[in-house]
Amino acid sequence: MTDTFRDTLYTIDHSGRRKWVYPSLVRGRLYWPRFVVAYILMLVYLVMPWIKVAGQQAIFLNIVNRRFVFFGVEFWATDTFYLFLVLGGLAIALFFFTSLFGRLWCGWACPETVFLEFLFRPIERAIEGNSAQRLRLDQQPWNFTKIWKKLLKHGLCAFFAWILASTFLAYFIGAETLIQMMQGSPTDNLVPFSLTIIFMGLMGFQFGWFREQFCTVLCPYARFQSVLMDSNSLVVGYDSVRGEPRGKAKKGQSDQELGDCVDCGLCVRVCPTGIDIRNGMQLECINCTACIDACDSIMQKLGRPLGLIRYDTENGLNGERRRILRPRVFIYGFILIAFLTAFAFKLNNRVLSETQIIRGARDVPYSALANGQITNHLHLKISNKSKQLRHYSVSTSEPGISLLVPNSPYPVEPGLIVTTPLFVNFDKSKLNAGKLKIVIKISDDSGYSELREVTLLGPDE
């Protein structure tokens, strides 16, 4: 077992230059489930903008208008508490599932892994060949064969990057709007067109050049996984008790003197980040299971038990007792349930009307009427988050005070924010040191009702 992996990334040599990885393809018992999961995820990503729920796009992140739709439920930018619950819940869910299943997300569902290993890398293999052929092609001087293969590969990758980038844009501007813009001139839709080109460029950079460097250099998940995991978290690991000492039996040496690992190096050649899983847990390992399938194929040929490299816990690999249910799992699980319960409760009791009373012109806090009364000019701001037309009314139980709103009850169309004048008339005798506090009730025809305390101003006499 070497120790250089502890302070050196495999993809960077001693001079600091990039070492390119050319992983071999291995299809085993875990490859095909990952294959199915990956293409289901890609299908969901591609079709979701075209699915309608309650007449709206299933997932629509309208940043320009600050409206966010998730499966028929529309959130506004003012719904910050829901954002807190969602982000907090996702963070706790990350802690919970990582403590149980390790980096299962990285190997099975991360967009980096899904798109690279099941879309762009297969295109590369189909055109340039297996790992050895790709390496030879990159090392040989430029000629006709190399040029047409590279052009074809990058052309196909650019086409699929365009599909992925356009779909990504559809989540933010709407699928139907995207189609209309595509039918028009790029100069008429310069911003969406430019964003599509930028997204394509980022995908080309990421999946064509940067690749596994993102997982090992930029992604923070690999860096703090050691905090979230313990010796009972699920990992892809090598059974050193069974595998060591590794090597092939030499002349005069019996198989009993060696472990099951024949040191074929296939587990290293199939790794998309180029590591040797036999060195133990490493931040570069994305738990993609390629080394499991590779090792199992060798063990099967040799007639030895499978699972020399397998999904297990660190304790399990060392022959110790596994503990799935442990304090951190209970703590994360309890907090996650609390977040989910709070979100469900808030969503079930969500108020679809929001109102504010804002003072009008600050340089004219009040006006004196001809009949001797004082009037305060306020603004009533109404947000109708529902999908129906609502009529809003204002009232107060304070005697001798009249509230005037144009066209009362005031109609507000669904999904709109409107501001209407609100005049409050009262007798000057009600003032105390130039101020009067009253409570205004705002209600609509759906049962919404809210009380707002307002301080009225007048002459201090």
Image (cartoon, rainbow, N blue to C red):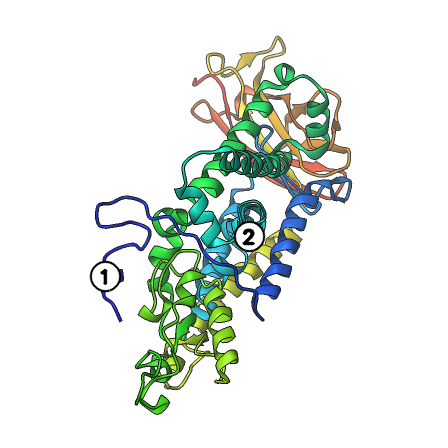
Of residues 397 and 274, which is closer to you in this image?
274
Give the x, y percent position of residue 276: 35, 65
Of residues 54 and 102, which is closer to you in this image?
102
**Position of 163 relative to 95 (above/below):** above
Of residues 209 and 266, which is closer to you in this image?
266
- Residue behind mark 2: 114
Give the x, y percent position of residue 177: 70, 28
**Amino acid under disc 2:** Val
- Residue behind mark 1: 4
First in residue order: circle 2 vs circle 1:
1
Quadrant for the C terminus in the image? top left
What number is the disc on residue 312?
none
Residue 152 is drawn in which quadrant?
Answer: top right
**Position of 328 relative to 174 (above/below):** below
Q: Secondary structure at mark 2?
A: helix
Callout 1 crowding tier (Cα within 10 Å): few <14, some 14–19, many ≥20? few
Q: Residue at x 30, y 90 (%)?
A: 252
In the visual, does 344 lie left or right of 53?
left
In the visual, does 136 lie left or right of 283?
right
Quadrant for the N terminus in the image? bottom left
Give the x, y percent position of residue 101: 47, 68
Give the x, y percent position of residue 282: 33, 63
Q: Residue at x 39, y 43 (%)?
A: 139
**Position of 431 relative to 74 (above/below):** above
